Image: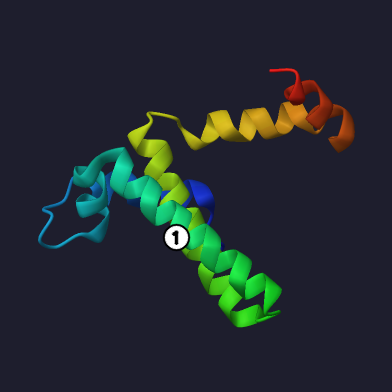
């Protein structure tokens, strides 16, 4: 069975309403965007370090942490994963360079 980001999004939603003494996710949710965004940033740096070190195992583990923390941040921002997927789908209709150029004008 494959575990998907949609599955993880459901886990975050469920655990986010658990008691904070039993759930790390609930603690992040209770801490609000500042705490969750800080943890997301820390995980992003750890992904970069693992990538530069060419440490495949660490890259996998840190990427999992990064995706988890991203889903917590999205939940706090009331942004469903589906909307991010839709944006990715919209962007794949053009070349990456053209898409980036269109965002530079924002």
In this rendering, the count of numbered labels is 1
Where residue 52 sits in the image (x, y, percent)? 69, 73
Say left or right for 106 vs 24.
Answer: right
- The residue at 61%/74% (across/down) is 50
Judging depth in this view, the residue of 21 and 52 nearest the camera is 52
Instruction: Decide: is 61 above or below 63.
Output: below
Judge left or right: residue 60 versus residue 14: right
Compared across the picture, whether 22 is left or right of 95 comes to left
- Point 44% across, 53% down: residue: 40
Residue at x 16% of width, y 51% of height = 18
Q: Which residue is mark 1?
A: 42
Direction top: furthest residue: 106
Q: Nearer the viewer, residue 43 or 88?
A: 43
Q: Which of the 4 quarters of the picture holds residue 39?
A: bottom left
Q: Is residue 86 visible?
A: yes
Res 82 → quadrant: top right
Report the colour scheme. rainbow
Dividing the image into 4 quarters, which one contains the N terminus?
bottom right
Whether residue 94 is visible here, answered yes or no, is no
- Report the residue at 56% width, 62% height from top: 2
Above-or-below relation of 85 to 104: below
* Neighbour tally class for label 1: few under 14, some 14-19, many 20 plus, Cα within 10 Å: some
Does dot 1 land on a helix, a strand or a loop? Answer: helix
Q: Position of residue 44 (x, y in %)?
A: 53, 58
Q: Locate the C terminus and report the quarter of the image it occupies.
A: top right
Q: Is residue 5 above or below residue 90?
A: below
Q: Give the image location of residue 65, x and y in percent.
A: 46, 63
Query: Is 48 positioned to the left or the right of 27 in the image?
Result: right
């Amino acid at each position: 069975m494959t575990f998907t980001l949609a599955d993880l999004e459901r886990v975050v939603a469920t655990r986010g309403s658990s008691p904070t003494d039993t759930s790390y996710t609930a603690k992040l949710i209770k801490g609000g965007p500042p705490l969750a965004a800080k943890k997301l940033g820390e995980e992003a740096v750890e992904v970069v370090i693992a990538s530069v070190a060419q440490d495949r195992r660490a890259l996998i583990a840190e990427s999992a942490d990064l995706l988890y923390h991203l889903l917590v941040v999205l939940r706090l921002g009331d942004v469903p994963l589906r909307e991010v997927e839709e944006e990715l789908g919209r962007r794949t209709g053009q070349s990456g360079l053209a898409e980036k150029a269109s965002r530079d004008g924002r």
